[in-house]
């Protein structure tokens, strides 16, 4: 189970994100030299996530707070603040070099450096796509990983544990988060975005179901590229995201690869003050160097010291298996007995949290007829993910022309832009077209796979990368409106009868809620 209680949003937001000393020096230099002051201030701000957040907060707290959501650039923000307030933005604000130390400092710098790399890529792609406000996309990308930066400030030990579980021990990102924090980074990011009143595009990009929106998709792809290139430009996840970027930019893959390489170099030159390894520094590395990168962050000597002080992954999590009648404690997460040939990475299976499932049922029952659509569906997918222990949960809506099912609400996508664009074409007869004929549920398992698997569309098989899942179509007034899909991602994390019954129960509550909304 998780060795850590879920971190409160109050703790995460109690301290502001620090700014870089370089930003303070650069601000003083602009103030003394004059020139195009607001543009120069804006350029400095967009390289420093902490300063960008501070600027937005100052704007919101001033007389023009009603305009903060409409800001499309930091130059515009400083103009609204005025010369005197802009000039003093860095005065008295905590500086990174003085407030953080050890791996909290190095971790924060690494995350900020990665965020700027992602932001620069997204900004460049916005220009290619003739976006009306490229700086707005840059800012949204820069702040996408705000939860990680806040965690390095407020809970560095747990962030370090998360990185080790993910990189050194090879656990999937989504599951490593639950072990280290008791919740997902996505959850923390949304809470922080709401508490700090971040711009709308930041909030939109934190919801995987918005991946169909072109501007959001650009942010997500840039974030995914920056994260994967931490492990190298030849790492498998990097090579998987590059074709998606080529598709997004409607350009040949070879040209896109060359272009994003150039962008990485340009980003490193734009922000040389980050005392972290830029993604551009890994361009000369040959395939297979990922282990060296991980070893650089987690040397064996440190790993041995940690092993003497803290429980190992095997002690944190126990072997996986079907859910039993005995309910696990909150945030209980188990690891399977070992990797298989087809699945080399360690896998973690989320187990049911009885308290969350029961609370979800109570909330859905109590809120029947009162909840908005967003409240109803987000409560339902949360109950499936955390309450039942289903790693990936999607609710797809039937498109207006009824030719496909498109993801609308989602949890557990692990920041995968491909899975986030989850959709099922209904243009030909197959398993899901039959499911949509009436409200019915299905559990693909060992007993019926031979019968149903040939009916599965090939593109869906490729998308989900597993051969066992739950699905249930939802009808309102005897007309199809959508479909719930859920799985446990790993072939080693088995679905079970109890989880299937609970899944169906939540689907039925959601259907009743939708029927009430339809009235």
Image: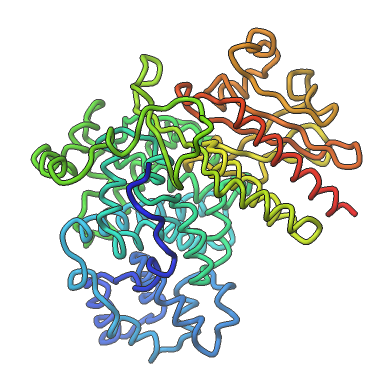
> In this figure, which colouring scheme has been used for the structure?
rainbow
Percent across and percent down for residue 374 are 69, 55
Viewport quadrant of the N terminus: top left
Q: Position of residue 228 (x, y in %)?
A: 36, 39
Q: Observer-nearest residue: 502 or 241?
A: 502
The answer to whether residue 260 is left or right of residue 109 is right
The image quadrant that residue 397 belongs to is top right
Q: Residue at x 58, y 13 (%)?
A: 446
Q: Is residue 136 above or below residue 345?
A: below
Q: Residue at x 35, y 32 (%)?
A: 318
Q: Viewed as shown, does residue 326 lie left or right of 347?
A: right
**In the displayed structure image, the side of residue 260 where residue 505 appears, left or right:** right
Q: Is 513 above or below relative to 29?
A: above
- For this orientation, the residue located farthest to the front is 326
Outermost residue, top side: 450
Name the image quarter holding residue 449.
top right
For image coordinates 76% across by 40% down, the residue present is 508
Residue 302 point in image, percent of width and height: 12, 43
Q: Is residue 136 above or below residue 513?
A: below
Residue 157 place in picture, x, y as percent: 25, 55
Q: Quadrant of the C terminus?
A: bottom right
Q: Residue drawn at (48%, 78%), measured in percent from left and top?
A: 77
* Figure check: 456 above or below 79: above
């Amino acid at each position: 189970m998780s060795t850590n209680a879920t971190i409160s949003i109050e703790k995460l937001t109690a301290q502001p994100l620090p700014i870089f000393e370089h930003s303070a020096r650069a601000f003083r230099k602009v103030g003394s030299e004059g020139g195009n002051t607001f543009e120069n201030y804006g350029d400095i701000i967009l390289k420093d996530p902490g300063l960008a957040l501070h600027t937005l907060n100052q704007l919101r707290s001033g007389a023009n707070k009603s305009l903060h959501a409409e800001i499309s650039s930091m130059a515009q923000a400083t103009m609204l603040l005025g010369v005197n307030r802009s000039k003093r933005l860095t005065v008295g604000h905590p500086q990174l070099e003085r407030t953080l130390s050890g791996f909290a400092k190095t971790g924060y710098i690494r995350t900020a450096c990665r965020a700027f790399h992602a932001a620069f890529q997204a900004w460049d792609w916005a220009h290619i796509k003739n976006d009306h406000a490229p700086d707005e996309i840059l800012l949204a990308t820069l702040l996408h990983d705000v939860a990680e930066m806040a965690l390095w400030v407020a809970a560095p030990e747990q962030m370090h544990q998360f990185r080790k579980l993910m990189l050194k021990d090879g656990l999937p990102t989504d599951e490593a988060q639950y072990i280290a924090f008791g919740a997902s980074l996505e959850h923390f990011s949304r809470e922080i975005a709401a508490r700090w009143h971040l711009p709308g595009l930041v909030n939109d990009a934190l919801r995987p179901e918005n991946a169909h929106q072109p501007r959001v998709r650009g942010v997500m792809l840039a974030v995914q590229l920056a994260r994967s290139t931490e492990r190298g430009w030849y790492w498998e996840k990097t090579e998987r995201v590059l074709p998606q970027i080529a598709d997004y930019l409607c350009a040949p893959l070879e040209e896109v690869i060359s272009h994003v390489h150039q962008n990485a170099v340009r980003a490193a030159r734009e922000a040389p003050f980050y005392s972290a390894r830029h993604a551009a520094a890994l361009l000369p590395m040959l395939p297979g160097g990922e282990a060296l990168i991980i070893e650089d962050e987690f040397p064996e000597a440190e790993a041995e010291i940690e092993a003497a002080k803290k429980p190992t992954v095997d002690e944190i999590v126990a072997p996986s298996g079907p859910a039993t009648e005995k309910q696990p404690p909150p945030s209980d997460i188990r690891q399977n007995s070992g990797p298989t040939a087809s699945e080399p990475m360690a896998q973690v299976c989320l187990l049911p949290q009885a308290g969350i499932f029961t609370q979800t049922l109570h909330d859905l029952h109590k809120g029947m007829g009162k909840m908005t659509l967003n409240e109803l569906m987000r409560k339902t997918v949360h109950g499936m993910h955390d309450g039942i222990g289903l790693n990936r949960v999607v609710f797809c809506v039937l498109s207006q022309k009824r030719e496909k099912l498109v993801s609308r609400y989602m949890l557990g996508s692990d920041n995968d832009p491909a899975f986030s664009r989850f959709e099922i074409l209904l243009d030909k007869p197959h398993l899901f077209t039959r499911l949509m004929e009436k409200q019915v549920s299905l559990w693909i398992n060992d007993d019926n796979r031979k019968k149903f698997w040939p009916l599965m569309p090939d593109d869906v098989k490729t998308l989900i990368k597993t051969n066992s899942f739950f699905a249930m179509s939802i009808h309102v007034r005897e007309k199809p409106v959508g479909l719930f899909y859920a799985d446990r991602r790993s072939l080693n994390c088995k679905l079970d009868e109890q989880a299937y019954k609970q899944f169906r129960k939540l689907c039925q509550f959601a259907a009743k809620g939708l029927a009430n909304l339809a009235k």
